Image (cartoon, rainbow, N blue to C red):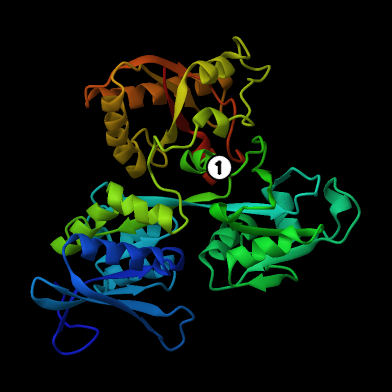
Amino acid sequence: MVAGGGGGGSETSMFRLSGSNTIGKALAPDLVKAWLESKGATDITAEARKVPKKDAPETVIHANLDGNRITIEVRPHGSSTAFADLLAGTAEIGMASRAIKSGEAETLRAWGDMRTPNSEHVIGLDGVAVIVNAENPVGALSTAVLRRIFTGEIRDWSEVGGPSGAINIYARDNKSGTFDTFKELVLRGDPLGDAKRFEDSAALETAVAGDRNGIGFVALPYVKTTHALAVNDGESAPLQPTSFSIRTESYPLSRRLYFYSPPQATNRDAKDFITFALSPDGQKVVRKDQFVDLDIAAAETSAAAQTNAPCRLSSAWPGDPNAYCNLRRAAEPLQTSFRFRAGSDTLDTRSIADLRRVLARMEQTPNKQIVLAGFSDNLGAAAGNCALSTARARRVAQALATLGLNAAEVVGFCSELPVRDNSTPEGREQNRRVEIFLR
């Protein structure tokens, strides 16, 4: 436990979480309360604590546990504060809605490698749906066009293939985690244009449903009577926002949510809490709070989820252009894609955790066979990219083999079917992936 307390002289602080408002606003407090309940805690209460010069209030959770009155603090002041507070020793867990940056990892080098599975934990995924009125004929837009619409550069629907009419923008308020995601993935530093702002996603969705010229954005579960646009990034094909496309990180407006803890940390309660967040009970809280959980075999029908996803290979592909379509029809895609640490063939931390999830899935259906499909970005010669895509799929096959799982087939699809913009480093990193199927 941590010396000092937040709610009185007789209280002891168990651990402190600091960082992302997207996580810290509701998800982290809800996970803390669920974890305390699982430990048999009683008299669990939460109080909002206003901090001078900070927009978001902090949450202090109080409870009785093992005969002690304890507190756990959640400070949601932005992802960058996660790493600053870990460095300062004023937090045991960092919350981030982005991966740690190289400079931040280097600053924390004394604590160990913050990018290892012992330190970096993907606890869920966030996805934003861009919505229009159900009668709007526009079905798909790129992230570049969305940026021009939401900054006010494009003002009429006729400029993007719709009927003539002034575009009315609806947006969440500045305190919203959904707006944080939209700012990062669409606005990318540009200011939001003239918009009607909403504190509540349901109210925003209702407003767009009643406005033929409206456009807005909400978390995926709030899409009720509006139409969610398919979105593409760069040359990738437009994808609808579904739990499947967000879990596989193919949908452009999706991102990971992280907990970070120093690998040499000694706070056992903080470690136990992170383990709970990744457990089935913790993932139920992730779903309840409108985020996308990490269950690779969730209830959504995968075939239906991929109905509108592209599958035909380009003319550059040397074989059957329907090879990937045939694979997708004959096998069940699991709801994850394996990705790698930047500049290496080492699986990233989410992928390492997903290996165990694949093992659990195979234990339920041991008669199924595993098929791995690798993809590369488009940098370099075509032959090299084909070799790289196959090599990465084989790397995943080797990792699965250490768990006693053998891949029946490994295939590389070169730089075909990108899911993100190959003109950016971030997009290329997402395109270097391995998909997994069961047949």
Residue carrying label 1? 242
Q: Is residue 99 visible?
A: no
Q: Nearer the viewer, residue 113 or 337?
A: 337
Q: Is 81 located above or below residue 55 in the figure?
A: above
The quarter of the rendered structure image containing the N terminus is bottom left
Amino acid at the residue labelled 1: Thr
Q: Is residue 49 above or below residue 125?
A: below
Give the image location of residue 262, x and y in percent: 23, 59
Judge by depth and name the residue closer to the eye, 160 or 205.
205
Vertical side of 207 occupied by 12: above or below: below
Hey, which residue is sitting farthest right in the picture? 164
Report helix, strand or loop for mark 1: loop
**Residue plotted at (18% across, 69% down):** 41
Q: Position of residue 211 (x, y in %)?
A: 79, 61
Q: Is residue 7 left or right of residue 75?
A: left
**Residue beneath the point at 40% across and 51% down:** 124
Side (left or right) of 117 relative to 225: left
Give the position of the C terminus as an image quadrant.
top left
Residue at 86% from the left image edge and 61% from the top image edge = 166
> Which residue is outermost to the left?
67
Q: Residue 416's image quarter?
A: top right
So how many labels did they put on this image?
Answer: 1
Q: Quadrant of residue 285?
A: bottom left
Q: Position of residue 156 (x, y in %)?
A: 86, 57
At which x and y percent is residue 281?
A: 29, 51
